[in-house]
Amino acid sequence: MENFSGKSVKSVYQDFYVKVLSKNLTCIIINSVDNEIEEKSKTCKHSQKVNFLQVVTKMKNRICLFFYRSSDEVKKIVNSLQECFYKLSEGERKGRKFPRNFDNKTSKFSFEYKNSA
C-alpha cells in the first residue's frame, strides 16, 4: 500500500478506495465458492483454502470489466472467475511458521507518479 499513483491527497484516497473495492469484490466471489471448496477438502488430505494472492492477481485485470460490460457478460466473467478460484484452492498446512526479517530497511519503494515533461 506504500506505492501510490500520485502525490496529491485525492490520488492517495483514490488508490486506497480502489484497493478496498477490489478486495471486497474478490471476497464476495470467494465466498460464493466456499461450499465447493469445503466439499473438495473432504476428499483431500489437508483442508483446502483459496490462495488469496493469486486470486487478487486474477481479479486485478477484470474488475474494470464489471463496469463496462453488459450484465450477461459480467455473469460470464464472474462464472469464469469462480471456476478459476476453485482451481486455485490449495491445501492448508497448519503449524507452519516462518518468521519475517524486518531488520533489512535498505530496500525502498519506487514512486509510481511520473512528472510531465
Image: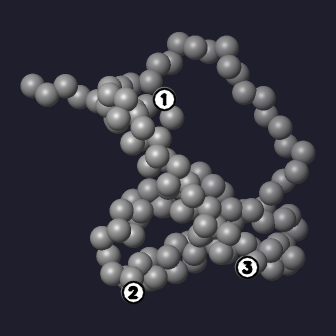
Residue identifier under label 3: 36
Residue at 85 percent across and 78 percent down: it is: 43
Quarter of the image containing the C terminus? top left
Determine the secondary structure under disc 3: helix
The amino acid marked with disc number 1 is Glu
How far apart, in angstroms, are the residues tagged by discs 3 and 2?
Answer: 23 Å
- Viewer-side label of 3, 2: 2
Rendering quarter of residue 66: bottom left
Taking the view exactly as shown, the residue that stands out farthest to the bottom is: 72
Classify 10 Å Cα crowding around label 2: few (below 14), some (14-19), many (20 and above): few
Of labels 3 and 1, earlier in sequence is 1
Residue at 51 percent across and 35 percent down: it is: 1
Residue at 30 percent across and 70 percent down: it is: 68
Q: Taking 53 as reference, is 69 left or right?
A: left
Quick check: can you spot residue 14?
Answer: yes
Residue identifier under label 2: 72
How far apart, in angstroms, are the residues tagged by discs 2 and 1?
Answer: 37 Å
Residue 2 badge:
1
